[in-house]
Amino acid sequence: MFRNYLGLDYFFMAFVSVMMTWLFASVALGLVVLLSWALMFFLFRKNRSVYKELLKREEVTLLSPINGQISGVRAGVNHPIFGDNLTEVQMRIPIGVESGLNLPFNCEVAEIIETKGKSFYRYNEFKAASEQLTKFKGILVKLTGRNGNLVGLQMVKCHMGGSPRLWVSSGDRGKMGANFGQFPLGGTLLMYLMPEYDVIIESGSSVDNSQTFLAGLKTRAGIEV
């Protein structure tokens, strides 16, 4: 079956609405309804999960958690939840790309915080001060690895997008590349890295979910990333 973030009830609703329109209205209107449903299923499509066999690399590298583009990188950022002197990797998820959220490394979900506040237009330059970082509408996720490494993810809702959805809870564990949520119609994702991570991707680069390497631990620089 076509992989999708929408449930089976949506497929049933689509079938019934198209058939009812064809039977009791017109074929032309039925085609419009069919195309509308096809567009919705396309926007909420789901890629097949990819688990990379990276041997030792899986503990020292980070993969992109989204499909989209790097819109900026800031060093020396202090975050009220994730800590101080972090590197902030700003990622933009456009409307139309597959909008799944995947784990960037083998980790445990240490904490999930839902924030209320203002939305942020994904194509604007993000330069919020430290004390303003939790004033945006979205979700904060703190991820921890076996070696004590910490990665913070902050999903910020866009005016023209949906709210992020997660299907994990605090204490859940998952492998690199495991799907843990969806960001309907995209938005902004901010990734916060400890100083021990060396960012190996530049602003403006396109990234693929669970395919593109973002950073590696400096303490294990001998391992190619």
Image (tube, rainbow, N blue to C red):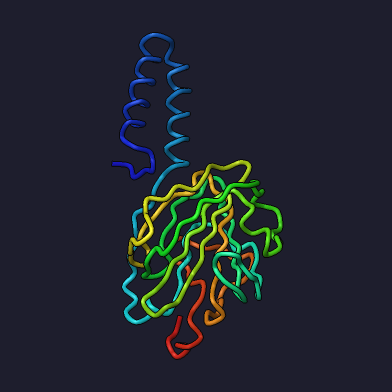
x and y percentages locating residue 66 in the rendered image? 48, 58
Q: Quadrant of residue 108?
A: bottom left
Please determine whether, in this image, residue 20 is positioned above or below residue 171. above
Tell me where residue 44 appears, x and y as whole percent.
Answer: 44, 42
**Along the line of sight, which residue is nearer the eye, 216 or 11?**
216
Seen in the image, is 140 located left or right of residue 27? right
Q: How many marks can you see? A: 0
Depth check, front residue: 55 or 159: 159
**Farthest bottom residue?**
222
**Residue 20 sits above or below residue 143 on the image:** above
User: Residue 106: horizontal and vertical position, in percent?
Assistant: 36, 70
Within the image, what quadrant is residue 202 found in?
bottom right
Residue 173 image position (x, y, % from top left): 33, 64
Q: Quadrant of residue 72?
A: bottom right
Query: Which residue corresponds to the image point at 35% horizontal and 62% vertical from the top-left?
Result: 171
In-front residue for pair 184/27: 184
Which residue corresponds to the image point at 45% horizontal and 91% vertical from the top-left? 222
Q: The N terminus lies in which quarter of the figure?
A: top left
| For residue 204, side relative to residue 138 (left or right) | right
95 lies above or below 69: above
42 sits to left or right of 201: left
Q: Is 21 placed above or below 214 here?
A: above
Tell me the residue at 60%/68% (across/down). Answer: 88
Give 124 or 41, whichever is nearer the viewer: 124
Residue found farthest to the top = 24
The residue located at (39%, 55%) in the rendering is: 180
